């Protein structure tokens, strides 16, 4: 079985090499060393990437707009909440500062107004302290610190008041404290004027400047109040007044007037043109003129007569400035609220529009990817349908059916885009593939027909050669010539089997047929006769099974292939044992060798081949060592046999051929009971000798056929009488039958007997090499001479020459299972 072993080893090596090949992980395919994503993943990426990017951009924009909205809303809320309370505290501190200066300069002045103002300041401070609980996280930067500083400075009012009342704090100390408190409150205005909205910030900055003007007028009023009481101003007080006048003028003319709205400009014009404002300005100009040329150690005199006019002008101007601040504050608050509302609307619109765009893009992308995937899958389904159709078409072509490419491969409906081009390419490729398959199938069928025709012609020549050998064997009796003729006969029988292999490979069936059942032992011996090293084959048949006539030829061929495979690839002189025995489902024939055997995977591979042989392409499998096994598989499947390869106990391979019950037959009624015995055969079906008759001491016993021995001629040959009864006879005379010799059995006449050198004169005879009788063969000789087989064959042909027997078809002559045919 070394033919099977070699093929199995090659398959195992290929499988191991395939396992060593690097496979792609997770079922993901590799193309040219690159990892390729599946279509679903690619389309999912196409869907998610723009969707995620757009959602991210929309989320970022919405977050930024939301943050801006929260900041402006918080700033507007803090502005509308903190500014009024801070303005009340600011005004209260301004008035308390002036009244405190008046009391400190003129103790005789009534303290009733100062007490009422202190109560109003305390009330404003308590209201302002409530804003410390407001959330300023999204508000103006530094607002919390400004509020905290104002509350801390204003919290010292009680101590300052006690110092003023007790006389511990003078006018300069009190002025400094109140000025610092007013600056802290004004710093809150400065913080509130800063915001994220540029328009609202500009309007708030004007409010801060207006409050700065109020602070300058308040400082000026507080310093002049103590000057009116004494009639003189120190140089330091004079400088404070002049600085305040210059600062308020700068703020009004440079910072306030250019940035006022229409309503604010109107109020500002009315304010500066009013009599009180004009009077205050004139008094300030006179004060500045009176202090010109004053040295550092001198003071500026003030006329007390103008104190009343200053008070009236200052209070009226202060009130006009309050109206302007209130009007501009209303404009600023309205602008801030409108800005917040617009931003809110913009935020909602942008968020809604962005969300709509995101949803639209996601839906459109999903729809487009779905359409793209659907079209790709449609083309794939079409390609898969073509892929299913093409093997069916090829299978039909292999069976010999006629196939129309236009009918079997329908044309795909192409579109007008790239998928249409792909469909057209599939159409061209599929039709080209079918056309190519049709041409190849036609070529293959033509080659098979050619192969069968050549093989049939060769078989005819082989048949003629066998007939010629038969004639030569009839004419010649020289043992050496017969031995050569038998060798040629044996080689011709093997050549006939090889030619039948070609017929089978070409899709045909062997033409050797039998009209009657044949004993299994004859079938085994006929298969043995077609093997080159047939002497190593030992046959053992249990029982007397017969093979149906339709299975004789294929079974001989199968067994001959298995026997030759066993002998060719097991080391001589190791025997090949053939055992046949009945089983529950038929008869099992075991062919066991002592070769190298095969691996378990190889047994599985070749057993699968025996169950389902593939369609053979002779051109592609010309060098395949499994052609013999392929022939066995083809014949066994067509006949219904079961062939299985198993490991042998000797280390080789055991081939088991199960002949089913349907291929077995009963012994024909025309055959006598003794014909079942190997020693007494039907004249139509002589058999090859078995190895059991190789011993010369037992070969001539009654019921045993003579055996041909290479290179030795038998001097005394008979088919029915024992060798011990044979005696030499004179030349030219037949040997008389002994008196105790049993009567010949009914049937063909006994074979003639020839005595060595009996026809020669005494002078030409060659003495025997030993003293042993010429009819005996040394015990070391494995078989008898070919002359015995030739004599037996000639008598068989004589019996069969009674007349031709036509075959079932009337054309092919039934070939007898004869020794020289061996198959």
Image: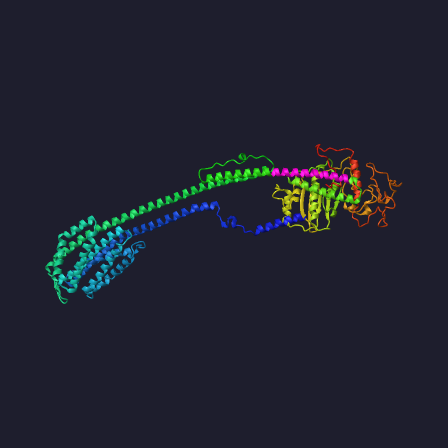
The number of numbered badges drawn on the structure is: 0
- Residue 739, percent from left and from top: 89, 40
Q: From the viewer's perspective, is residue 313 above or below residue 391?
A: below
Of residues 430 and 78, the one drawn nearer to the viewer in this rendering: 430
Q: Is residue 683 magenta?
A: no
**Quarter assignment of residue 530:** top right
Horizontally, is 560 left or right of 444 in the view?
A: right
> Visible in this render: residue 585?
no
Residue positioned most to the right:
739
Residue positioned most to the front:
763
Taking the spot 88% from the left edge, 41% from the top edge, the residue there is 738
- Residue 411, percent from left and from top: 50, 36
**Quarter assignment of residue 82:** bottom left
Please say which color scheme the image uses: rainbow
Q: From the viewer's perspective, is residue 272 above or below residue 800?
A: below
- Residue 667, percent from left and from top: 76, 37
Q: Main secondary structure of the magenta part?
A: helix
Look at the image and give the residue range highlighted in magenta: 444-472
Q: Is residue 462 magenta?
A: yes
Horizontally, is 167 left or right of 411 in the view?
A: left
């Amino acid at each position: 079985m070394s033919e099977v072993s070699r093929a199995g080893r090659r398959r195992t090596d290929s499988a191991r090499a395939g396992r060593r090949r690097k496979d792609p992980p997770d079922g993901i395919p590799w193309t040219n060393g690159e990892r390729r994503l599946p279509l679903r993943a690619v389309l999912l990426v196409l869907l998610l990437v723009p969707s995620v990017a757009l959602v991210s951009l929309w989320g970022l924009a919405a977050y930024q707009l939301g943050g801006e909205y929260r900041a402006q809303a918080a700033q507007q809320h803090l502005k509308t909440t903190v500014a009024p309370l801070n303005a009340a505290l600011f005004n209260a501190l301004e008035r308390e500062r002036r009244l405190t200066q008046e009391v400190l300069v003129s103790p005789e002045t009534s303290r009733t107004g100062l007490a009422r103002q202190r109560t109003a300041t305390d009330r404003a401070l308590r209201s302002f302290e409530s804003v410390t609980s407001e959330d300023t996280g999204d508000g103006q930067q530094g607002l919390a610190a400004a509020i905290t500083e104002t509350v801390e400075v204003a919290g010292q009012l009680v101590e300052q008041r006690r110092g003023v009342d007790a006389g511990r704090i003078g006018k300069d100390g009190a002025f400094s404290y109140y000025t610092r408190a007013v600056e802290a409150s004004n710093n809150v205005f400065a913080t509130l004027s800063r915001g994220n909205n540029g328009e609202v910030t500009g309007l708030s900055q004007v409010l801060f400047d207006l409050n700065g003007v109020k602070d300058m007028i308040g400082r000026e009023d507080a310093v002049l109040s103590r000057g009116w009481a004494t009639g003189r101003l120190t140089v330091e007080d004079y400088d404070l007044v002049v600085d305040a006048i210059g600062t308020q003028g700068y703020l009004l003319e440079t910072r306030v007037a250019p940035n006022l709205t229409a309503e604010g400009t109107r109020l500002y014009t009315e304010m500066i043109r009013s009599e009180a404002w004009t009077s205050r300005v004139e008094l300030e100009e006179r004060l500045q003129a009176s202090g010109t040329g004053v040295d550092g150690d001198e003071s500026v005199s003030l006329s007390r007569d103008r104190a009343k006019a200053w008070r009236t002008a200052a209070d009226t101007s202060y009130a006009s400035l309050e109206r302007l601040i209130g009007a501009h504050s209303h404009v600023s608050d309205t602008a801030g609220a409108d800005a917040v509302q617009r931003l809110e609307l913009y935020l909602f619109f942008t968020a809604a529009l962005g969300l709509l765009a995101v949803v639209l893009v996601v839906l459109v992308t999903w729809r487009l990817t779905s359409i793209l995937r659907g079209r790709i899958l449609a083309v794939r389904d079409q390609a898969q349908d073509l892929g299913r159709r093409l093997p069916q078409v090829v299978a039909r072509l292999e069976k010999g059916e006629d196939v129309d490419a236009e009918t079997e491969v329908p044309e795909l409906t192409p579109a007008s885009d790239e998928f249409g081009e792909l469909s057209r390419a599939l159409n061209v490729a599929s039709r080209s593939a079918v056309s190519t398959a049709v041409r190849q199938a036609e070529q293959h069928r033509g080659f098979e027909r050619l192969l069968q025709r050549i093989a049939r012609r060769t078989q005819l020549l082989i048949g003629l050669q066998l007939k010629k050998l038969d004639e030569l064997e009839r004419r010649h009796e020289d043992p050496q010539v017969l031995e050569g003729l038998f060798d040629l006969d044996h080689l011709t029988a093997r050549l006939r089997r090889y030619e039948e292999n070609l017929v089978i490979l070409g899709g045909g069936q062997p033409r050797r047929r039998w009209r009657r059942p044949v004993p299994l032992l004859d079938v085994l011996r006929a298969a043995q006769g077609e093997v080159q090293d047939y002497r190593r084959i030992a046959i053992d048949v249990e029982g007397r099974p017969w093979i149906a006539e339709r299975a004789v030829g294929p079974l001989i061929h199968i067994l001959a292939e298995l026997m030759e495979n066993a002998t060719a690839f097991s080391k001589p002189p190791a025997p090949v044992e053939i055992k046949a025995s009945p089983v529950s489902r038929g008869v099992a024939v075991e062919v066991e060798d002592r070769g190298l055997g095969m691996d378990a995977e190889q047994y599985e591979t070749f057993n699968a081949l025996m169950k389902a042989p593939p369609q053979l392409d002779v051109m592609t499998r010309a060098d395949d060592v499994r052609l013999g096994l392929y022939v066995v598989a083809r014949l066994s499947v067509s006949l219904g046999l079961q062939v299985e390869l198993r490991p042998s106990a000797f280390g080789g391979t055991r081939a088991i051929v199960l002949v089913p019950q349907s291929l077995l037959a009963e012994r024909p009624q025309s055959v006598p009971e003794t014909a079942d015995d190997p020693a007494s055969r039907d004249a139509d079906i002589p058999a090859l000798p078995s190895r059991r008759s190789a011993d010369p001491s037992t070969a001539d016993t009654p019921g045993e056929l003579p055996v041909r021995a290479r290179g030795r001629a038998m001097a005394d040959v008979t088919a029915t009488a024992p060798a011990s009864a044979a005696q030499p006879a004179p030349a030219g005379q037949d040997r008389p039958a002994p008196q105790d010799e049993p009567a010949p059995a009914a049937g063909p006449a006994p074979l003639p007997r020839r005595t060595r050198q009996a026809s020669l004169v005494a002078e030409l005879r060659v003495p025997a090499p030993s003293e042993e009788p010429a009819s005996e063969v040394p015990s070391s000789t494995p078989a008898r001479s070919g002359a015995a087989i030739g004599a037996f064959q000639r008598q068989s042909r004589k019996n069969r020459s009674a007349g031709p027997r036509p075959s079932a078809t009337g054309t092919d002559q039934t070939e007898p299972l004869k020794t020289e045919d061996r198959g």
